Amino acid sequence: MGDRPSGSWLKPMLKALSPQFREVAFLSLFINLLALALPVFILQVYDRVVFYSGLTTLQGLVIGMVVVIAFDFLLRQGRSRLMQRVGLRIDVEVGRRLNAKLTALPLRTLETRPANYWQTLFRDIEQVRNLVSGPTAVLLFDLPFVPLFIGLIFVIAAPIVWVLVLALLAFVVLAWWSSYAVQGASRAERTASLGRDGLISEMIAGRTTIKALALDAAMLPLWEDRHGGTIERSLVRGSRADTFGNAGLGLMVLTTVALTTVGALAILDQLMTIGALIAANMLSSRIISPLNQLVGAWRNFATYRQSVTRLGEIFGAEEERRESEIVLERPQGVVSLEDIAFRFDDDGPAAIDGVRFTIKPGGLHGIVGPNGSGKTTLLKLMQGLYRPSQGRVLLDGADITQFTRRELAGWFGYVPQECFLFAGSIRDNIAKGWPDAGDEEIVAAARLAGVHDYIVDLPDGYATDIGEAGGRLSAGQRQRIAIARAILGNPPVLLLDEPTSTLDRRAEEELRTTLSQLARERNVVVVTHSPILLSACHNMIALDRGKVVLAGPSHEVMPRLFAEHAHKPPLERKA
């Protein structure tokens, strides 16, 4: 099961990093204590060295400041390296956890959001890392020392402390207001950015179609609309952030003017010295500068909270089973569906409605039906990629929900209608699910798929680079390699979705022979409209609108299908 949503997933990780944070806090303590040296140096120079002409005192003060500066540099370097290690650990651990979570999510969960949404989750990790280990985190470690500087100002320049306290309150109000105003704008900007990036992903994926049909003129207005919306929301967010940033700078200057004015009046009344005023102004910069940064940092806080929430929702999502209670031997491959029903949406129509049948190994089984009848969905239900809303799927009498995705992938070989290959060599693609497979096993799988002769005829053979998504191969070659990938590992059940859609007649006949051979020892289920493959099927299941309308031996089902098809009106036949 998944973790709890929101930000609770991050707390254990931050707790594990508490030793490093304590070290950073310890170094920040000394860094801020050393920051007191410069105002004290200025105070002593004006009130003692200049007034009394104490050159020896000046020499000692300068030597002391050199030592302080060197020590301060070493402390800051140490703090920076600690924060870098914190950021690295967050990157590694959260990245690994997110990748594992995505692979454990059910297919339906992954299909509910566009691909670019899942990509942006890894950018959310960067947002979390930057806040926890970047300048904003250092700012949070420096803020607790503000009372220390206020206390010192009270000691050396008490008449102007009240000005600084009022400025402090003003900065807190401005920072809170900034958070409230910028957060909503940041969320709207990200939503618009996701929409634009999603369109870009579609354009890249469909680049061949766009070029072939000259769709650039049709796509350009869509892109301009989404890109313009993103820019507009970015300008709104930037305008608000700039407004509060400029207000912070103005408030910082106003505070300095007020401190100097009130201090000058106090000097005229002989309530403080010129050195005390200069030192107090320097100390006030140690207070005002972090507070002004805090105003600008609220956007980072807002983005951080949104990123933590999004990651928490994913970490809290229900996932597939990762561990089985017992380890079973290789099943025989008897697949039973008991009153299976499935809906893509809770309030939508049933894609699969009350399907019930059993298919056994030792034969080739065909699933037929018009487009949209639920054939592909049924295959995904059979191998556990989709979880039925009603009923259950059994493998050798055992409910498949008790098994892990790794186990099911080893028992169900699957060739989807749209075969996807990964960039790399042919060998890597065939052995993608079985990286420890030997050369003999890979060659045997390629022979069974009927692609070995083609591969060995290439200059680099199995080491041939197929390019992005197998773009250097024909559709038929990609499909054959996908079949070899599904066969490798000797699964007892082999599911194929329209495997002849890109094959010529000769290749179809070769595939029919291959599948007939595989079906002698396996349970082979094929979704197809190919008469060549259907002629080799022992049993057939006909679907229509998610229901089984005919099922049984092929020699009984085929005539009835043709008879029903012949009596349909021409338009309905075409559909």
Image (cartoon, rainbow, N blue to C red):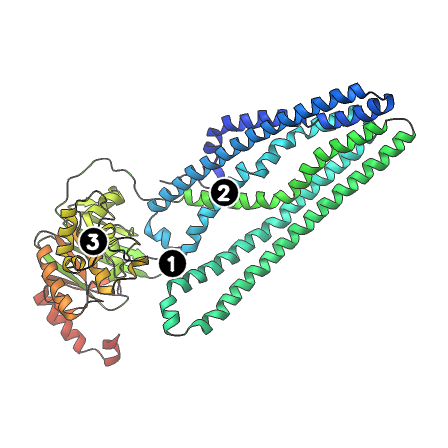
List the residue tagged with mark 1. 347
Q: Vertically, is 116 above or below 308?
A: below
Task: Tell me if residue 130 can be seen.
Answer: yes
**Label 3: how many Cα within 10 Å (few below 14, some 14–19, many 20+):** many
Mark 1, secondary structure of its residue: loop
Tell me the kind of residue under disc 2.
Val
Residue at position x 51%, y 55% in the image: 191
Please give left or right for residue 399 compared with residue 110 in the image: left
Image quarter of residue 91:
top left
Q: Which of marks 3 and 1 is in front?
A: 3
Give how far apart the Cα atoms at labels 1 and 2 are: 31 Å
Which of marks 1 and 3 precedes in the sequence?
1
Q: Where is residue 117 in the image (x, y as percent from the top left)?
A: 44, 53
Pick the front one: 114 or 458: 458
Q: Which of marks 2 and 3 is nearer the N terminus?
A: 2
Mark sitting earlier along the chain (1/2): 2
Which residue is at a point 37% across and 44% down the rendered structure image? 99
Q: Which of 46 and 353 is in front in this view?
A: 46
Q: Residues within 10 Å of mark 2 (few under 14, many from 20)?
A: many
Q: In this view, does 141 lie to the left or right of 376?
A: right
Does 271 sit above or below residue 446?
A: above
Q: Name the residue under label 3.
A: 462
Which label number is shown at residue 308? 2
- Mark in the foreground, 1 or 2: 2
Dot 3 and dot 1 residues touching (CB under 8 Å)? no
Q: Which amino acid does label 3 sit on?
A: Tyr
Q: Which is nearer the eye, 122 or 407?
A: 122
Residue 314 percent coordinates (x, y): 42, 45
- For residue 113, say whether it is visible: no
